[in-house]
Amino acid sequence: MRIVYIHQYFRTRQMSGGTRSLEMARRLVAMGHEVDLVTSDNEPAPGTPRGWRVTNEEGIRVHWYPLPYSNKMSYADRLKSFFAFAWKSSRRAAGIPCDVVFATSTPLTVAIPGTYAAWRRRVPMVFEVRDLWPDMPIAIGALKNPVAIAAARMLERYAYRHSTRIVALSPEMKAGVIRTGFPETHVAMIPNACDLDLFPGSADDGRRFRASLPWLGDRPLVIYAGAIAILNGCTYLVDLAKATKDLNPEVRFLLIGEGNDLERVRTAAAERGVLDKNLFFLPRIAKQEVPAALAAATLATSMFVDVPGTSANSPNKFFDAIAAGRPVAVNHRGWIADIVRDRDCGLALPPGDAAAGAKPLVEAIADPVWLARAGANARRTAEELFDRDKLAVQLEGVLREAVAAAGRPTTQPVTDSSP
């Protein structure tokens, strides 16, 4: 098949952030398909010329358009970025011959270039739902205007109505799509996944990472590696560090990342007396550096604010942690918390009550038998349920179904997909 893959925030392993699109696309290439991925360069270097450029990323033809974006931007500025990409990418995607268009959110506005390119090329579109947008911005108060909310709902239904198949990243996301009236048989649940070739990092990598942190030594380390945004509610970790300090002052917390809530979280840490005492910050790191950080960790974490909808999320932080064979503490409800409990691979901390989570956290960290068992269970869960290689095969099947449903023959796989 010839696949046009649209994702505004494509990342390589040399960049920070989630790499689902890279990992899925390169596996599709390895299966013999041609993949053109249309994306934005959201951190263009000074002097970067306007216009599109094309690179080869592990056999994927990646089309980059310079368009600054950061989750530190105001929501209004982020909306402008969403629609600017939708405008620029529509013509680009429509100009690439293909058998199927695969558009992945967020943002939901990728449905615009997706449907336009599919219409122009007379091919089906498969739409991937990475979160229940616009439910999440509504839940956290980022989207308040009734007219804007109504428009977002219309765009959501527009995206689904023009999709031949939909991929959802969690059971609750799948249920949310079905509630709009989309046929259940046409929705596939393909969650975020574990890159077993990248994780776990070696013990030597972990030791080197620890040695780079003069405040750490051989103390227990609790890591959060990901966006520090309003939705993530990282003040929970600040409160957890404060409560833990009274129970075991040797435990260290490390937050690695950036986002629109970073300064508020840092200020809260200073006010609670934990900043640079038992809680520390590092800037975001490239994906390929995450295994070393997790190899140094005693326990990893995944955090969200306790509002409706967050239980549906499929957080990369969780999948990286279990791939690394690390116990993972989560403070959100839903299917991920159920997996943590059912597979005995971490801790399900009480949402909204960090103080209550401190005691079980400290007890778990002090129990080497539990740490070994939970870490082994985490890696086993990654291998048995979330192996990226297996989930990529499922995605290929969905794309083939969409092409077949549209009554189009697929092109034969190719052996050379270089640009």
Image: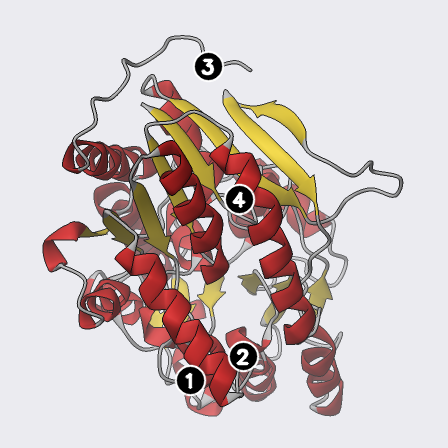
Q: Nearer the viewer, residue 66 or 383?
A: 66
Among the 4 quarters of the image, the one containing residue 111: bottom left
Circles 2 and 4: CB atoms closer than 8 Å: no
Q: Residue at x 44, y 37 (%)?
A: 5
Q: Quadrant of the C terminus?
A: top right
Check the image and report above or below for 51 versus 316: above
Element carrying mark 2: loop
Q: Nearer the viewer, residue 393 or 196?
A: 393
Amino acid type, label 4: Ser
**Which of the labelled discs sits on residue 306, or is there none?**
1
Circles 2 and 1: CB atoms closer than 8 Å: yes
Amino acid type, label 1: Asp
Q: Which of the two discs, 2 and 1, labels the residue nearer the N terminus?
A: 2
Q: Which residue is mark 2?
A: 233
**Which of the labelled discs sits on residue 90, or is there none?**
4
- In front of the other: label 4 or label 3? 4
Q: CA gap, disc 2 to disc 1?
A: 8 Å
- In front of the other: label 1 or label 4? 4
